[in-house]
Amino acid sequence: MKRLAIQTLAMFASLLLVGTAANAAAGKFEFTLRHRIPADDEGKLYRTVTRTETWDAAQTAVIVCDVWDSHHCLNAVRRVQEMAPRMNQFLITARSRGALIIHAPSDCMAFYKDHPGRRLAESAPQAPNLPADIGKWCHRIPAEERGTYPIDQSDGGEDDDPQEHQQWQDKLRGMGRNPKAPWTRQIDVLEIRDGDAISDKGAEVWNLLEQRGIRNVVLLGVHTNMCVLGRPFGLRQMAKNGKRVVLVRDLTDTMYNPQRPPQVSHFSGTDLIVEHIEKFVCPTITSDQLLGGREMRFAGDRRPHVALVISEPEYRTEHSLTEFARQQLQRDCRVSLIYGDAQDGNLLPGLEVLNSADVALISVRRRALPKAQLDLIRKFVADGKPVVGIRTASHAFDIRNAKLPSGSALWPEFDRDVLGGNYHGHHGSRGPESQAVVWVEKAAATHPILQGIPTEEFRVHSSLYKTSPLGPKATVLLMGRVGAVQPHEPVAWTNTHSGGGRVFYCALGAPGDFALPAFQRLLANGIRWAAGREAAKP
């Protein structure tokens, strides 16, 4: 029986390999394209959505943008060197499937003047539909007028240490290179093979695409916020002139200095540009969709990945948490925002991001999720990953007096088994008289989550939940009361959930609470503590 099972598994594995090989031999790409669509009428919230498409490799080109052999920013050089091997594997695989590879190291065409790839680009006949401005930089397309450009790159975006930068400039001069533009060719790690083209001219690239009937364009390279977006062969020109174009978001980098607004980490700056592109320019993909394994991540990018799962209409935390994440988390965390579907709050499009998240923040109220989506949350917990909950997370996956939708599932024990709580209603009625007064529990005063929290009592805007008694692993951080006669209740605590991961829960979260510096500080500290990080400076 055991031998039969092994043989069956081997047969399925063989069939899987045959199917994959057949797809590759057929010259197809199966991409999961990620983009963002408005999640509210005001255009302030955007939902991340994906769609799967199959592309004919013969109708696809991969453009490698400005992956030069050197740069005036030393940190940019280091990041290119780190990405280049993965980029080359991407090109090898795409080429083997039948895609055209176009190497576009701008301002370096003199180095390649006699190269067959250069002659290939120059010899393409002029296309009858050659766009009038295809030879120019494109600084903005009409769709971008709906948004605000997310980073300040007016200083050129260098993020070097000043002393190290000066040493690098001196070294470039010693090599006989222009310190402001030291590139001479494409980095050698990227192989240029027979059949590849070389061009930095928009018209030549367009002519090549039209000559070969290419409608799909994949762009990778640097720098996302400058050349990748704006070059004559860049994302904007391809998108506005009708090509089906995508950015490989893990094989790119920005020129962004964290000292400039919005003063986030360099890698968060790249995330903000990618988000902007997904909203207004084109979708993105990741290299693992072609190469397998995991998407590329810089060794220096040690940010915890925080996924905020939001679906509750009562406190409108889709607005308050989004703003909180922008202000308090994005500078040193990788942030993903998952909102309930506008038509059906029981659906959480994009929840699969939990598979790569380090921390999940739950702000959900009485939802019956499709079983497959609830299973993603169950797996997140079973894997021992940290969970943060606010306000209605204590009754996130339970419903009252309603019929369970077909195919949906509940988790009424989430409060007990994960958060360590015991939610069973409210103290007081709605209105000012129901606002709670909270204070730090003396025994927990030195806990890292309470760093920077006032030691004296302060009033909050949420009504007081009935939460006592807590689970045996819970440690109370804040207590609260309403008036003088109501019993005291735990308001914030830590726990170790059923999967062994850290938990921070806070029963606050009304809109007015987010205006309180103490609450914002508490929540930011709780998220970082759950992720195993120190509290950020105020």
Image: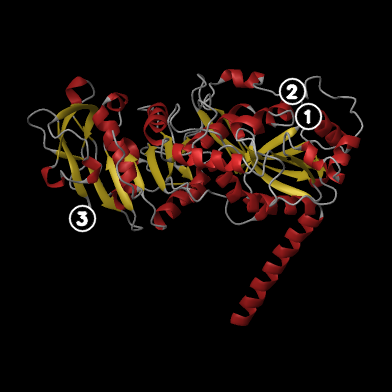
Mark 1 lies on a secondary structure that is helix
The numbered mark at residue 472 is 3
Amino acid type, label 1: Gly
Alpha carbon distance from label 1 to label 3: 66 Å
Amino acid type, label 2: Lys
Dot 1 alpha-carbon crowd within 10 angstroms: few under 14, some 14 to 19, many 20 or more: many
Dot 2 alpha-carbon crowd within 10 angstroms: few under 14, some 14 to 19, many 20 or more: some
Q: Which of 244/430 is in front?
A: 244
| Quadrant (top left/top right/bottom left/bottom right) for the C terminus | top left
**What residue is at 74 percent from the left and 31 percent from the top?**
233
Q: Which of 188/31 is in front?
A: 188
**What residue is at 79 percent from the left and 59 percent from the top?**
22
Q: Which label's residue is closer to the chain start, 1 or 3?
A: 1
Q: Which label's residue is closer to the chain start, 3 or 2?
A: 2
* Horizontal and vertical percent position of residue 30: 71, 48
Do the residues under discs 2 and 1 have CB atoms within 8 angstroms?
yes
Mark 2 lies on a secondary structure that is loop
Residue that mark 1 sits on? 202
Mark 3 lies on a secondary structure that is loop
Q: How is the image coloured?
A: secondary structure
* Horizontal and vertical percent position of residue 47: 53, 32
* Horizontal and vertical percent position of residue 223: 61, 36
Q: Which label's residue is closer to the chain start, 2 or 1?
A: 2
Alpha carbon distance from label 2 to label 1: 7 Å
Left or right of residue 487, residue 270 in this image = right
Residue that mark 2 sits on? 136
Extreme-left residue of the structure: 484
Left or right of residue 340, residue 97 in this image = right
**What residue is at 31 percent from the left and 49 percent from the top?**
503
